[in-house]
Amino acid sequence: MMDTETLPATDAGLARAAGLLRGGALVAFPTETVYGLGGDARNDRAVAAIFAAKGRPSFNPLIVHLPDLAAARTVAVFDARAEAVAAAFWPGPLTLVLPLRVEAGISPLVTAGLATVAVRVPAHPVAQGLLRAFGGPLAAPSANPSGKVSPTRAAHVLAGLAGRIAAVVDGGDCAVGVESTILGLEGAPALLRPGGVTVEALEAVLGAPLVAGGSEVRPNAPGQLASHYAPGAAVRLEVTRPEAGEVWVGFGDCPGAALSLSEAGDPVEAAARLFHILREADAMAGPEGRIAFAPVHEAGLGRAINDRLRRAAAPRG
Ligand code: AMP
Ligand code: MG
């Protein structure tokens, strides 16, 4: 358990918060929708710590928060439709799912290994101030333990996450209180989640109806993400004795393993490395090869790691 600082929404408070974020720590902050739990989106360990603090049982992708459209363009590819809705609704409670710019260095844990990224420019002055003081992209899901109600004031954040995060910036009550609308623009415009910006307002700007339901990445829909995560190689789990020809990926003490999620058996380190290791093991094994993962304890972040590994091992159709 750590002491969680409550920081004022002053220049000094925001400078302190930005310093904590640069050091890889987690800071909750107000947006116009709900309080977000921020971490450096380019830092694998910071992003892994977000999942650990929230107790999320799966690595569903996170929204990247940026100070303005120019900053968002460095992280995602904007087409004419994306430019139009951004001009109309940013800063504001609208998240866009767009093709990822790989060169931006966003952690694959933020995108859950997808080729798309969710980006948003919040309107709240404290969120704006923090993003500018920090000077980089912040991954920020709602600042509540997984499965609990989203927080709309600093006291709610502390009730759920005190002792698990470095600080919360107290900016009073959130105005909107519901999450951002998520609009997918990879193909036909799709409403991935209803929220602070209405469908009617989006359709008016796009000049086209939204495709309903869409393909929001839901953590609990089994196999939904499998194709994005599945290595070309065949994957076996819970392996303590690898077979000849398998690339063995260890966790903890695994003498002879080709790779390791974490030699120390640290689940936060394992989560931070997970997508990098999946890629590396796949390259080592080759398309006809086989990968064998050592068991990871099914507790805390281990649950999310095992969820992802099970998807990687699932039979493909
Ligand atoms: P939260 O973490 O509570 O702010 O929720 C973030 C939402 O954004 C989740 O519903 C995710 O599934 C969705 N999301 C984030 N990134 C993507 C993406 N690349 N594609 C589709 N949905 C996404
Ligand atoms: Mg949430």
Image (cartoon, rainbow, N blue to C red):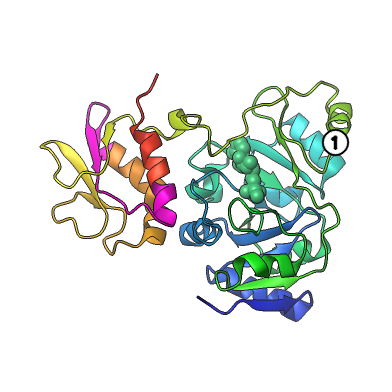
Helix, strand or loop at mark 1: loop
Q: On the rendered structure, is 111 left or right of 91?
A: left
Give residue 297's position: percent from left, percent from top.
32, 54
Please name whichever residue, 257 or 150, is drawn nearer the observer in this view of the structure.
Answer: 150
Magenta region, residue range: 283-305
* In magenta stretch: residue 170: no
Inspect this view and state whether residue 117 appears.
Answer: no
As drawn, which residue projects farthest toward the left?
244
Tell me the crowding category of disc 1: few under 14, some 14 to 19, or many 20 or more residues within 10 angstroms, Cα based: some
Q: Is residue 78 placed above or below 29 in the rendered structure?
A: above
Residue 196 is at least partly visible in this image? yes
**Quarter containing ligand 1?**
top right
> At 23% across and 40% down in the image, what residue appears?
292
- Tell me the kind of residue under disc 1: Thr
Check the image and report above or below for 4 versus 189: below
Which residue is rendered at x = 64% and y = 28% of the image?
Answer: 186
The residue sitting at the top extreme is 317
Front residue of 286 and 301: 301
The answer to which of 146 and 132 lies nearer the viewer is: 146
Viewer-proximal residue among 226 and 207: 226
Give the left or right position of residue 154, taking residue 265 as reference: right
Give the residue displayed 82% in from the left and 21% down from the top: 208
Check disc 1 and report the residue beneath it: 198
Q: Which percent across, then down, holds residue 76?
A: 64, 41
Above or below for 286 versus 68:
above
> Residue 168, located in which quarter of the rendered image?
bottom right
Q: Is residue 179 left or right of residue 135?
A: right
Q: Position of residue 276 (x, y in %)?
A: 38, 47
Count how many numbered circles sit on residues in the image.
1
Q: Is residue 293 magenta?
A: yes
Residue 74 in the figure: left or right of residue 256: right
